[in-house]
């Protein structure tokens, strides 16, 4: 048998506890001899979960969120909704090649590791499951789930999927704070229950996914039931950075935003936000290296290109990369917001 993965499947885990365990799993995986972890959870309680780089005040409407918990996950992408009827799948790997012993580009991580999820969905019969290289899981040509990932500075891989079992994973429209998108072509949404014609229980899905992983990777799955994962993560707030100039732009995958502070013709601080999926070290490096950069289109563009030409750095869903420089320049020059 190949590498071992530990599976934790538990119904009654609050979303905050769930993401607390994801954080701890990433830290453990980054240590010497770190193990893989597979989390399969139908959360108790509900929460709107921001992608790693989204600004709460832009992505959601504060006055419409009410008492809904607002959390943030470690991978990028859009806001998803967690609660009863939605299953969360988190895969933490100590390295990119932990299961797949071959070289492949970092930005192809989901293409390689989503296959067991698609196989598990099709194992119930009557559906075709696809991933088209963006951020959606498709069942019979409709969106049934969302997927994103990150690779941190230690090379630890996190892949997160949210799948509608009997309820949609998408955030209710009334909560969405972004302008109405025009670029993204509507596909329509579905759930596993709707596509299959019956409810799939968590244990059924967990078994199907475990079997797929064992079959494809030769991994030994050890199931470990636990009742309490830890304390809730702090909720997000809607406070924007002070004294900043911001710019928001629609892209092919969603929205991209920058805010900046400028002093004496140079960028004093810059933060990048949006629905994009990128490796966290690249975003951190770019924000750091833009600090002190003159407010000049060519200088900003050079920094952006330099960071994303480094091996292992990627940004999915934002094309062309030069758009980053355009939005940062716009924010630093006065912005729209």
Image: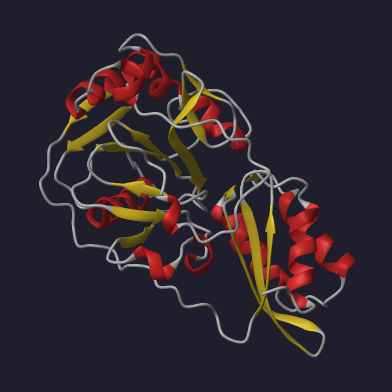
- Measured as percent of width and height from the top left, residue 35 is found at 32, 38
Q: As rendered, which of 170 and 156 lies closer to the eye?
A: 170
The residue drawn where x is 45% and y is 51% is 173
- In the picture, which quadrant includes the C terminus? bottom right
The residue drawn where x is 42% and y is 69% is 62
- Measured as percent of width and height from the top left, residue 79 is found at 45, 52
The residue drawn where x is 24% and y is 33% is 7
Name, please, the residue furthest toward the front. Answer: 174
State the colouring used for the structure image: secondary structure
Counting every numbered tag in the picture gives 0
- Measured as percent of width and height from the top left, residue 319 is found at 74, 45
Q: As rendered, which of 242 and 282 lies closer to the eye?
A: 242
**Position above or below: 109 against 321:** above
Q: Going by the image, does 1 lie left or right of 329?
A: left
- Residue 1 visible within the image: no
**Location of residue 49 by image quarter:** bottom left
- Measured as percent of width and height from the top left, residue 225 is found at 12, 37
**Position above or below: 243 against 211:** below
**Location of residue 124 by image quarter:** top left
Name, please, the residue furthest toward the right. Answer: 298
Q: Going by the image, does 332 lie left or right of 253?
A: right
């Amino acid at each position: 048998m190949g590498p071992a993965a530990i599976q934790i499947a538990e119904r009654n885990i609050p979303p905050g506890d769930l993401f607390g365990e994801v954080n701890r799993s990433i830290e453990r995986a980054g240590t010497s001899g770190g193990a893989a972890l597979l989390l399969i959870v139908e959360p108790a309680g509900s929460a709107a979960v921001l992608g790693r780089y989204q600004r709460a005040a832009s992505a959601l409407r504060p006055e419409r969120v009410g008492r809904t918990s607002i959390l943030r996950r470690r991978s990028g992408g859009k806001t998803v909704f967690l609660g009863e009827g939605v299953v969360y799948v988190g895969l933490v790997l100590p390295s990119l090649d932990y299961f797949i012993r071959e070289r492949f580009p970092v930005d192809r991580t989901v293409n390689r590791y989503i296959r067991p999820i698609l196989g598990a969905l099709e194992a119930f019969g009557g559906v075709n499951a696809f991933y088209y290289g963006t951020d959606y899981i498709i069942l019979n040509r409709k969106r049934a789930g969302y997927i994103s990932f990150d690779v941190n500075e230690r090379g630890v891989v996190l892949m997160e999927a949210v799948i509608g079992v009997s309820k949609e994973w998408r955030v209710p429209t009334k909560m969405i704070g972004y302008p109405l998108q025009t670029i993204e072509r509507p596909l329509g949404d579905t759930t596993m229950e709707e596509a299959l014609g019956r409810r799939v229980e968590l244990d059924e899905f967990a078994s199907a996914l475990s079997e797929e992983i064992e079959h494809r990777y030769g991994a030994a799955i050890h199931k470990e039931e636990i009742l309490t994962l830890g304390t809730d993560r702090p909720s997000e707030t809607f406070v924007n950075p002070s004294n900043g100039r911001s710019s928001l732009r629609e892209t092919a995958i969603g929205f991209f935003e920058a805010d900046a502070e400028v002093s004496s013709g140079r960028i004093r601080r810059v933060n990048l936000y949006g629905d994009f999926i990128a490796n966290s070290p690249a975003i951190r490096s770019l924000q750091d290296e833009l600090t002190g950069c003159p407010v000049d289109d060519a200088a900003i563009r050079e920094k952006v290109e330099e960071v994303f030409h480094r091996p292992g750095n990627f940004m999915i869903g934002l094309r062309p990369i030069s758009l980053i420089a355009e939005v940062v320049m716009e924010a630093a020059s006065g912005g729209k917001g």
